[in-house]
Amino acid sequence: MRRRLTPGKHSRAARRAFLRALPLTEVGARTTIAAVRAKSLLIGAAATAGFVVIARLTMFPPAHDEVAARAPLPLPSPPTGPEAVPAAGEISVLTLLGEMADLMHLARLPRPQFAAGQAASTDRRSRSPDDGESWFANDDFVTATQANLVRVEPRADGGKRYVLLDARGPGAVLRIWTATPVGTLRVHVDNQEQPVLEAPMAALLRGDVPPFVAPLAHVTARGHNLYFPIPYRSRCVITTDDIVSPDPFTGKPTAKLYYQIGYRSYGADQAANVRPFSAGELARGAHALHRTATLLRSAMPPAPSRPVTMVDVASTEVEPGKPSITTISAPPGGGRITQLRLATAERAPDKLRATLLTISFDGEETIRAPLIDFFGTGPGVAPYASLPLTIAEDGALTCRFPMPFRERAELRIARQTPGAVDIRGDLAIEAAPFVDDTLLFHAGWRPRHIVRTRPFRDWHVGTLQGRGQLVGMSLNVENAANTAWWGEGDEKIYVDGAPFPTIFGTGTEDYFGYAWSSTEVFAHPYHGQTRAPANGFGGAFSMNRFHVSDPIPFDRSLRFDFEIWHWTDTAIAIDATLYWYARPGGRDDFHDAN
């Protein structure tokens, strides 16, 4: 059954009307991001000569439960006056903010092209898989004697300047994460002596420095995060002036700094198109910043701007040999699924995991995963809200990743073991030309493996071939009872056959935006921990991360591995789902695994 809706402009009222027209209920979850009271803290923004300076007095790091108790700062008042219009090909705060809540940009090849990178406190003893145990070296932090960073420089006052990033441009910083926010963070662009951004790291990364408020900056399960674009034309240097912070378990000072900085690098020919980060650029992007932060707080992308046709997934009982099959014809010239919504009353994890979702576009199957796992958690229902995927309190399953196709799409839900599962749902379809840079949406599940934790090893998640970009991952782990923390392992992402990881992390929870082996359940538009044991580390964990503002492009291939690094010699059960886009004809190694 088809139903045609015309939401009109990107208004909140139109969005609400559009959602009310859908037959499935959805509980929108607003993410509450922590903000912390600081003693004697004065923050002022000065806009002079194109840079921002944050002035501060003194502050004291809060206890973790104080962090968890605070509500986010309110958004700044909506800006007045006309909104800036970017020039063709422009790379700026304005244009990059536009990518942070709009999922549509993921479904096409990046223009202009860029390469993803990460600077991190990864243990520098990890040099080659052939080096044995040193490949799994686990001191992924900066100390006074272990410089797992770019370099350490002397300051005129006798102190030290710890250089966390020194990237040659043109490019843009997109994400900063740390487990140990300490010192003053300074960002210099294009060899300017004065920093364009200077603030206490803890205040900045927990959302206490406007306009970098939650959910742009936020604390999730002890992890401090900032998602905000900082473009630069020729160079970006990020530093801190201290590495001593309170140990979260003992409260005693410890000289350890854990960090990750995600960035992208453009070709040299794009330098002229970059508008470097500055106070003026922040003001120019004020409308986009307010709109993006508002959308992210609601965990909803912009409302559709084109007429939408609804296609029902018929209510049925799915059994072995009796799948649910829904066929969709594209509008002339091409179309895309902008929202997929499914519901089932089934709650048994084993039955849900044995219910398989597959989707084919123009005869090419690109999605194959268990029903619940496709929606970002597993093996059973765990309510949460992110920007691309949501599981509501009532069990409604929503996917907002756009799924383009040229002529025909087929959604199939099948049972692999005896027993019936009820299914109903619908899809929103809009006309969208299928052109040379259009990408197909993919999701692949690496089935559950029982893995010994000794010797240390890299567990292979997936290899992707073709041209496209990685946009997300979910991970499920079942840890043995009465054992220690299992998640010291780093993500290792190899792009286009690189012999050394293009992205080399600092710990499992760090990749997912939290810290210190926390078992706190949380949800943010870009990342979450949807399941964790109530006591200790024994039991089921589920977590996800979505690369909405920081996709990882590949021209030929991408390989994703995760270290298995457990403090105990034991065994764990592990499975994972990758999400990516690729040009038609792309291949992967998930089908063989399934």
Image (cartoon, rainbow, N blue to C red):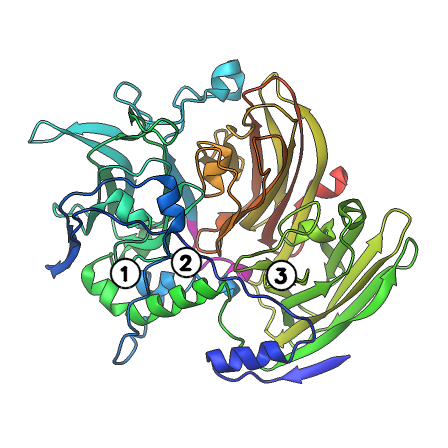
Q: Are marks 3 and 2 in contact (CB under 8 Å)?
A: no
Rendered image: mark on residue 211: 1
Q: Are marks 2 and 1 in contact (CB under 8 Å)?
A: no
Q: Which residues are magenta?
A: 106-114
Q: Is residue 69 above or below residue 574?
A: below
- Kindly state the secondary structure of the residue where label 2 is placed: loop
Where in the figure is residue 528, as x and y percent of width and height?
52, 48
Judging by the rendered image, the residue that carries numbered circle 3 is: 392
Rendered image: mark on residue 112: 2
Where in the figure is residue 169, as x and y percent of width and height?
29, 47
Amino acid beneath label 1: Pro
Q: Is residue 518 above or below residue 525?
A: above
Q: In this image, 341 relative to 240: left or right?
A: right
Q: Earlier in the sequence, mark 2 or mark 1?
A: 2
Displayed quadrant of residue 359: bottom right
Crowd around label 3: few <14 · some 14–19 · many ≥20 (10 Å): many
